[in-house]
Image (spheres, grey):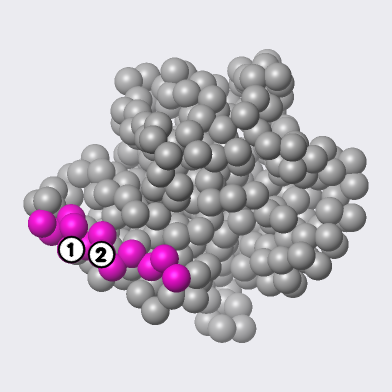
Amino acid sequence: MTTSTDSTPTTTSGTAYRVQGAADGIPVVALHGTPGSRFSATPARDALRALGLRVLTVDRPGYGDTPGGEVRPARELAQDVLDVLTHAGVDGPVGLLAAGGATPAAVALAALHPERVAALTLVWPQAPVAPDAGSPAMEQHAWLRDMDEQQRMLHSLALQDPVFLRDQLELGLGADAGAEGIVLDLAQAQEPWGVDPAVVRCPVDVWWGTDSAVSPAGHAAWLADRFSGAQVHRHELDEPQWHVRRLVEVFARLGERLGATPLTDQELRAASAAVDTDGCGGGSLGGCACGAGGCGAPS
């Protein structure tokens, strides 16, 4: 087993990950959004145990202890997740949750390796914009619609001058905020996926709201229309960071898809009260609410 300096489990290809929740729970992989890390976008540890889930969270390329590198095809990003499952000794199908910039990897994994994904949950997903022979995409004007000017500028800079953008993000966010990962995500979002979401056959839940200028609602709607029978959880009221308060509900729904015993309303409220909302990775209760794809643009 290859490990980093803090004994974080790391695959032979360099992907760092974290395991939390119930030791004998139903396996789930959670892929953070942009930005984020293996400490992002999960409920507190006690909540995961109450849900009966064993959750593997992953440092995606350029974040945390996982090296960055070049933009890679979505199928290679999906292979990173398979490497984590192998390294962690997880056999058989798992639940897969992805937010924001992790959408291409998650959809590629579900499409290309259906035997490994029992259910897929997307939170504030990002749709493809660059079509190719094997993957449809949104039209560019629709992809950009409702995206604020700052976010459009970031996507443009990620292609035109990624080194300058990385340096500016490090100045503004700090050296450990995953600037390299942010730039990779912004560029990756403009590459063809190489897979068609329509071929995904597992149950799919799509969670989204209208209060994000980072991953606009149109992206979620486009994707939901292409999945067969996707269950859409839509929040149209002005409810900033709804995914923070409803994070346990999101994981509970995924758990039920995988055969977990549903919680009563009282149990769900009790578990939801433990969600860590006091900072990115700095909370005393466990996973952070950031990195779900709609918290706000990097600035």
Labelled disc at residue 270 = 1
- 180 relative position to 195: left or right: right
Q: Amino acid at mark 1?
A: Ala
Q: Residue at x 84, y 53 (%)?
A: 165
x, y percentage for residue 5? Answer: 61, 83
Quadrant hosting residue 166: bottom right
x, y percentage for residue 168? Answer: 83, 60
Front one among 213 and 123: 213
Q: Residues within 10 Å of mark 1 (few under 14, many from 20)?
A: some
Labelled disc at residue 273 = 2
Q: Residue at x 38, y 72 (%)?
A: 286
- 99 relative position to 202: left or right: right
Q: Amino acid at mark 2?
A: Ala
Q: Residues within 10 Å of mark 2 (few under 14, many from 20)?
A: some
Q: Is residue 18 visible?
A: no
Q: Answer above or below: position of 63 versus 138.
A: below
- 102 relative position to 192: left or right: left
Measure the C-alpha gap from mark 2 to mark 1.
5 Å
Q: Residue at x 64, y 20 (%)?
A: 142
Q: Which element carries disc 2, helix, strand or loop? A: loop
Span colored in magenta? 266-278
Check if mark 2's residue and mark 1's residue have beta carbons within 8 Å.
yes
Q: Residue at x 49, y 51 (%)?
A: 292
x, y percentage for residue 83? Answer: 52, 55
In the rendered image, residue 107 lying in the magenta stretch gets the answer no
x, y percentage for residue 234? Answer: 37, 32
Q: Answer above or below: position of 131 versus 95.
A: above
